[in-house]
Amino acid sequence: MDIYYKKWLQISFLNLFIVAVLGFLLRYKIAFYLPFIDQKNVLHSHSHFAFAGWITQTFMVLLINNLTTSEVNNVSKRYNWLLYANCITAFGMLITFFANGYNLFSNIFSALSIFVSFYFALLYWKDLNTEPQKKVSHLWIKASLVFSVISSIGVFGLVYMMVNKVMIQNWQLASVYFYLHFQYNGWFLFAGLGLLVAKLEMEKNNIINLKRTYYLFVAACVPAYLLSVLWVKLPIFIHLIVVIAVIAQLIGWAILIKVIKQNIAFVQHHFTKFGSNLLLLSAIAFTIKLVLQFGSVHPALSQLSYGFRPIIIGYLHLVLLAITSIFLIGYIVSFNLIRVTKYLKIGIVIFVVGVIANEILLMVQGVAALSYHVVPHIDILLLGAAFMLFVGIFVIFLNTIFNTVK
């Protein structure tokens, strides 16, 4: 990878470190007295910056690096200002949400962030169309761009309700979940699988199965949104569509796993061992997510899952940390996009252990909440997991700063 992209990945890991700092602050305020920090404001700052500053920023860098038709200098001229713009809007949301929560300035930066994503989608789509060879990975990536744009409907819905002061709780929740669904089940998932498929399709015998997987996932993405609103009474036939969508995702995932198993020698040759292990962890987490989705189609389980905050937080962290963040780090390490040293591996291991500990603790807290029990010292234990995430990312970030290869 050219030094141009390495520098941008350094910024990505700086942003992830800031996300970890905010996460630690949130856990600290729950466990101990911290009067000068507004919990809700920090939460908004944490979540918006995680989406824009860490995940979206990193996917942009990796997707730009994935382009094959242009020289690095030409690519940097077209996309450099977009990466800066995304960074500026992300930091704008970080500061304004932290200071005052939802206000004029935080809304302005949120809107600008959406417009940056629109322009990136348009520009990248055009560049994909100039590629001399049409690939299956292009389908995945184009779908990710479409879902990124679609997700903004949820944000615009919230803005409309705020402006008109019509804050109906069900509609408000439906808008929030609409944005979240098409971000992590659309933009994040399809961009990540698009990058992975770009490697797997180098083996031509995989093309048919990779296309089948794509069609199953893309057909399921829109109806799968209804999983997020099963607490609303839906007609039986709509519920049936949701069940079909969940099954389609499970079948698509099974086909993709089969492709990887059939090409294990290819994977071992082209992916580093450490990176492959990280991608395996991300795949296991994704499998758990699909199983949980399948279980949640039962109305009683759906009502429980959306009625307890620890379960919602655990699910979101499963998607954003265990699946997406570990995938991004695993992909970067698999292809040596940053210099992989002993200390980088140590930092990643600490981070991964923190992710696993965080998920287990949230799961225990969620199960206990179902029976209205409180787990002793759970806030301190979750603070410890947040500290591990903080330390792991700090070590990773320092490594990217002091071990850049020119």
Image: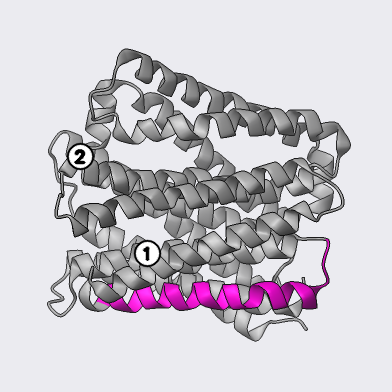
Label 2 environment density (alpha carbons within 10 Å; few <14, some 14–19, many ≥20): few
Query: Which one is nearer the viewer's eye here, 8 or 364?
Result: 8
Q: Quadrant of the C terminus?
A: bottom right
Q: Quadrant of the N terminus?
A: bottom right
Q: Nearer the viewer, mark 2 or mark 1?
A: 2
- Asked whether, in this view, residue 252 is left or right of residue 205, the answer is left
User: Quick check: 369 above or below 394?
Assistant: above
Give the extent of the magenta segment.
69-98
Q: Amino acid at mark 1?
A: His
Residue corresponding to mark 1: 48
Residue at 60 percent of width and 78 percent of height: 81
- Asked whether, in this view, residue 338 is left or right of residue 231, the answer is right
Residue at 39 percent of width and 49 percent of height: 153
The spot of residue 179 in percent (x, y) is 38, 49
Query: Which one is nearer the viewer's eye here, 29 or 81?
Result: 81
Query: Which one is nearer the viewer's eye here, 150 or 232?
Result: 150
Protein image colouring: one colour
Residue 170's disc is 2
Residue 114's disc is none
The spot of residue 313 in percent (x, y) is 31, 49
- Asked whether, in this view, residue 237 is left or right of residue 83, the answer is left
